[in-house]
Amino acid sequence: MANTVVRIEHLQKSYLTEAGEFPVLHDVNLVIEPGEFVAIMGPSGSGKSTFMNILGCLDQPTSGKYFLDGADTGRLSSDQLAGLRNRTIGFVFQGFNLLPRARLTENVALPLVYAGVARSERSARAVALLERIGLAGHVQSFPNQISGGQQQRVAIARALATRPRLLLADEPTGNLDTHTGAEIMDLFTQLNRDEGITVVLVTHDQEIAAYARRLVRFRDGIVEHDGPVVAERTEAHA
Amino acid sequence: MMLSMLAEAWSAMGANRLRTFLTMLGMVIGVAAVVAMLAVGQGAQTMVNQTIASMGSNLFIVLSGGSASGGLRMGSGSVPTLTLLDADAIGELPGVAAVAPVQPGNSEVIYGATTWTTQVYGTSPSYLDVREWPLASGEPFTDYDMRSASRVALLGGTVSNYLFGDDDPVGKTIRIRNSPYLVIGVLARKGQSLDGRDQDDTILVPVTTAQRKLFGSQFVGTVRFMMVQASSGDVMDRVERDITELLRARHRLNVDAENDFTVRNLTTVANAAAATTKVMSLMLGAIASVSLLVGGIGIMNIMLVSVTERTREIGIRMAIGARRRDILMQFLLEAIIISVIGCCVGVALGVGGAFLAERMAQTTVAITSGSIVLAFAVAAAVGVFFGLYPARKAAYLKPIDALRYQ
């Protein structure tokens, strides 16, 4: 059986400010198995975004352990972490974060550049990914020539380029209208169901969270609730 | 990988053309200045070195008469105290390669209807060895010519040219002070001496001929000066002491009497001249290097701005798997491209400028491949050196800080 994707033990994160140490996450424990679809919710300042950045190896915990795909991330070098971000994780941002000067194919192929994939294969894979998300006609376009929803699709294509096990999305629909947001969520659902990619997304929108199968709710830096989405829905309707 | 990074750097530079161009301009001016200044400096050096080489190496000149320091004392060379026998004795000293006694004079020289006034040196065959002066044609005079005081002459290039034009003078007879002299050879051209005289405007005859038949000498067998060549630069000091001792002994001078001759080390003079031009050329290079340095600082400045501007882009790249060295290379490559392109243009401008200077200022410039290689190496080094700090700054950003940067 494949490794547990995410195992988090006694994770703590605090920031140093002029006023002193400011704790954001206290003693978080979480296990995510392959193929799960997890939504993380919580009010502003609950630490969910900080948690997401740590999951994405963009930030490091103050204390505690984070095992990603079996590897203890606290013991890895910066190059090894970069390797994890490149091959194991696909990150989708609220603000898309495409490179404005690069064509869509170049944007999608960028992770493959850092993975050391040959040029011809890079562009072939990028074009295939763009076709799959329905942007076959925009291969040579620049990001500012397409809509926000399309940009987010390109960002997802980029996240998928190295065929990662774990797809992380931080408010992926935050900048999109409801209809487009729903399309993006369908894409995530499809990836999770058809390809078994583990998806973790942060949102503050119940509707969006409803696409997931498991809900983790943060409050004041701790996991307040962790359970299946169905229960949550029932509660909301009751 | 490398190719796509180059393309990336290129497009980043293209995104801000004016800024890239101005940064490059700083580099261009710096490199052009270095190349042009080195060319001018090395040109001067080459000229001086050629002149020095034309004099002969490891040379002493021994002048008759004491050094001029007292009131009524005659100057060097004015009192004939050196003889051909002195010359022979010096030739026996260890460390002396060759000795050439010289009895100089000026005379009118006539060939056909042409008259030319020039310097006539009475000397020995070894003069050609001492001065390292080959013949362009004909034969040198021999010891037999010396013993018999033959009327034979070797012409300098300038004299040959004035009297004979393009004809070969060897075998023709010229008249010096109304006596016929057979031209047996023509000296190769040497050009100007250190003090600017034309060394080719001269005629050589056997010293005995000069003494007995041409100029005479105050005392029989004396010469005005002689040139001594040491066998190597290392023995110069010892040879100078030995010559002084030998001549004092031969001239039977008391311990407290002053020398009645002067020994001068010509190499010292030449070295001083060479050292002066070397310093000049170094100074020119140093001044030009300052502009190269300023160009480098310009690159660093722009790269720092560029890193700050693109912090977010750096964050995105890190989030999708760029390692530190990927980011480092990206920015370093940009700095190197700017400096290398700037360098190419600068070399072209510098070479052009140097030739222009040659035209306008009538100086010699020497563009060596060494100076161009140096300029390239320095420019690449400047690119790396001044690009490294901004590039490292970018590479060592924390991914999350770079991503959050607005």
Image (cartoon, coloured by chain):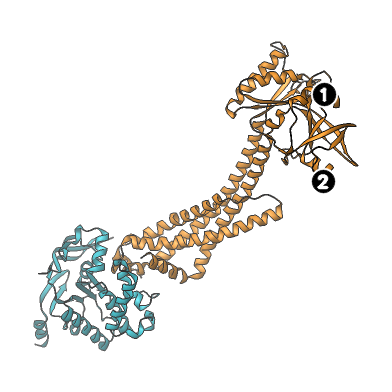
Image quarter hosting the C terminus of chain B: bottom left
From the viewer's side, name the closer residue of A106 and B72. A106
Q: Are marks 2 and 1 on the same chain?
A: yes
- Horizontally, residue A228 falls left or right of residue A208, namely left
* Rendering coords of residue B69 (x, y %): 75, 22
Residue position marked by numbered label 2 in the rendering: B165
Q: Colour of chain A?
A: cyan
Dot 2, how many residues are within 10 Å of its Cα: few (below 14), some (14-19), or many (20+)?
few
Can see residue B26?
no
Res B211 label: 1
**Which chain shows up in orange?**
B
Question: What amino acid type should be assigned to the residue bearing mark 1?
Answer: Gln
Q: Is residue B86 left or right of residue B296?
A: right
Residue under the image location 8 percent in, 82 percent down: A231
Q: Position of residue B38 (x, y in %)?
A: 59, 50
Q: Position of residue B308 (x, y in %)?
A: 40, 65
Above or below A177: residue A62: above
Mark 2 and mark 1 residues within 8 Å of each other at the beta carbon: no
Picture quadrant where residue A225 is located: bottom left
Q: Which residue is pictured at 38% across the width and 68% down the height?
A: B4
Q: Secondary structure at mark 1?
A: helix
How far apart, in angstroms, are the residues tagged by discs 2 and 1? 30 Å
Kind of residue sitting beneath label 2: Gly
What percent of the width, then of the height, locates residue A97? 32, 74
- Foreground: A222 or A133? A133
Residue B175 - label: none
| Up/down of B273 relative to A25, above or below | above
